[in-house]
Amino acid sequence: MGRIVTLLLLVVAFCLGAAISYYNRADVTFYYLAGQVELPLIALLFGAFVLGVAVMWLLDLARLFVLSRDSRRQQRQIAQLEAELKSLRNLPLAQGGAEPPAPPARDLS
């Protein structure tokens, strides 16, 4: 059900964007460092959107790389700690003649 609603909202947003772009076909002058160019407004807006998505994707990719590196480091640390715990569990008990403590006496009066 949620997928259908999401798909329907995307189709409505696409149709709305297409209608707005059709009725706003005015050319605008875009000034950049190396000069200027005349473009339709929708092309300029779409280009800015694509550029923003690309920048965010690269930032997300960098963050994903850092998180995966941290995850691998933590997995190695967990494996080392589990190996240490296993070796500590396999150690023999102390055999120095020490007897376990006696349970406390109960007072039944």
Image (cartoon, rainbow, N blue to C red):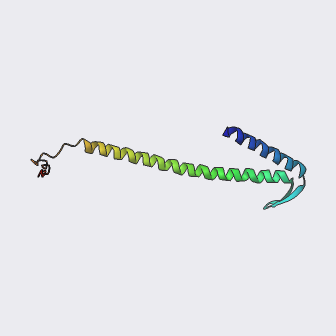
**Residue ID at (77%, 41%):** 11
Q: In the rendered image, which quarter contains the N terminus?
A: top right
Give the residue drawn at x 75%, y 52%.
49
- Using the image as rendered, state which of residue 47 and residue 100 is in the foreground: 100
Q: How many labels does the image show?
A: 0
Residue lying at the far left of the rendered structure: 97
Q: Looking at the image, which residue is at 49% across and 49% down?
A: 69
Using the image as rendered, state which of residue 36 and residue 66 is in the foreground. Answer: 66
Give the residue at x 70% y 50%: 53
Q: Is 2 on the left or on the right of 63, as rendered?
A: right
The image quadrant that residue 6 belongs to is top right
- Where's residue 47, x and y in %? 78, 51
Q: Is residue 58 left or right of residue 19?
A: left
Going by the image, does 98 lie left or right of 59?
A: left
Q: Which residue lies furthest to the front in this view?
A: 109
Q: Where is residue 15 in the image (x, y as percent from the top left)?
A: 82, 44
Viewer-side residue, 62 vs 89: 89
Report the side of 22 relative to 80 (left or right): right
Q: Residue 17: x, y in percent?
A: 81, 48
Q: Which residue is nearer to you in this view: 2 or 64?
A: 2
